[in-house]
Amino acid sequence: MSSLPLLSFIDQFSRKQKNKLLKDC
């Protein structure tokens, strides 16, 4: 198991969360 896919998944998730926060503001 390589941690790369997991990191990219977390990165995408964090970006989505940031976008949600920006839209909420």
Image (cartoon, helix red, strand yellow):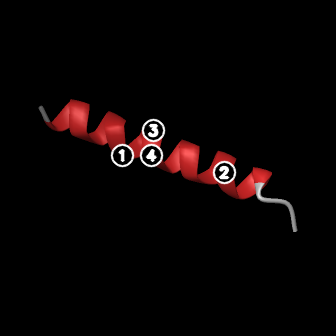
Residue at mark 4 to residue at mark 2: CA–CA distance? 10 Å
Q: Position of residue 17 (x, y in %)?
A: 36, 46
As drawn, is 5 to the left or to the right of 9?
A: right
Callout 3: SS: helix
Q: Is residue 12 above or below residue 6?
A: above
Disc 1 marks a residue whose amino acid type is Gln
Task: Determine the image quadrant of residue 23.
Answer: top left
- Residue at image mark 4: 14
Q: Which mark is residue 7?
A: 2
Mark 1 Cα-neighbour bin, 10 Å: few <14, some 14–19, many ≥20:
few
As helix, strand or loop, the secondary structure at mark 2 comes to helix
Q: Nearer the viewer, mark 4 or mark 2?
A: 2
Q: Secondary structure at mark 4?
A: helix
Residue named by callout 3: 15
Dividing the picture into quarters, in which one does residue 22 lie?
A: top left
- Residue 17 is tagged as 1
